[in-house]
Image: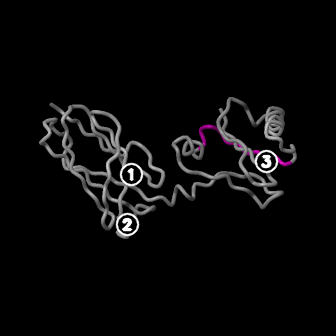
Amino acid sequence: MMWFEAGDKTTQVLLESGSISLDFTNDSVRTAYITALASNHGVSLSNVSFYYLLDTDVSVLRIRNGDTWVPTWSGSAPTGELNGVSFTTEDAKKWLDFSTDKTSAVANSKDRLTISVNVLTANKSGIDTTFSGDIDIPISLPEGQSKARFTFFTGKSSKAFKFANSGSFSIGSRKLLDYRMNNTLNVDVVL
């Protein structure tokens, strides 16, 4: 498997990207694929720029993980060529770090479980004390998927949960558009 990106050099717009079971190290395979791409997108063959990586490359693994990326170009239009991917936007995102006061809770609608969330700086050097506001964070409850609104003041927030049904509670396992998850918490909710 190989991952590729193809773009129009004249506009520097990405035409296609993805993983495919072709060997792009083979010149004839690569040429045939680029020719088909040009035809499918109505772009002159000479205006198609093509870049590929093995599916096991660390950049491809990040893309598969859902990290935000953009194609990079070696120069400006109309002669620049695709030469990689950039994760600058993803790497600038802050982290959400989760902790809890207990590792299990009783499903009796009385037992309280407190989840604390800190907003860490992009380089994880500490809590972002400049952040205050609300973040709706995906959670998994014994009853199913939901979101919980955490209100932050100087980068910190906490929220108490009570459970009526047994099962599992988790937070931090699903991605958010604007934040990265530093860890995942899983809590057993028992009878």
Q: Is residue 80 magenta?
A: no
**Percent position (x, y) of residue 161?**
21, 46
Q: Is residue 22 above or below residue 61?
A: above
Q: Is residue 131 above or below residue 113?
A: below
Name the kind of residue labelled 3 in the image.
Ser
Residue that mark 3 sits on = 49
Q: Quadrant of the N terminus?
A: top right
Numbered disc in front, either 1 or 2: 2
**Percent position (x, y) of residue 127?**
35, 64
Closer to the N terminus: mark 1 or mark 2?
Answer: 2
Look at 44% across and 59% down and name the residue there. 94
Residue that mark 2 sits on = 131
What is the basis of the colouring in this image?
one colour
Name the kind of residue labelled 2 in the image.
Phe
Magenta-colored segment: predominant secondary structure: strand
Q: Nearer the viewer, residue 58 or 67?
A: 67
Q: Nearer the viewer, residue 83 or 35?
A: 35
Name the kind of residue labelled 1 in the image.
Asn
Side of 164 relative to 13 (left or right): left
Image mark for residue 182: 1
Q: Answer with the quarter of the image where residue 132 lies.
A: bottom left
Numbered disc in front, either 3 or 2: 2
Segment colored magenta: 47-57
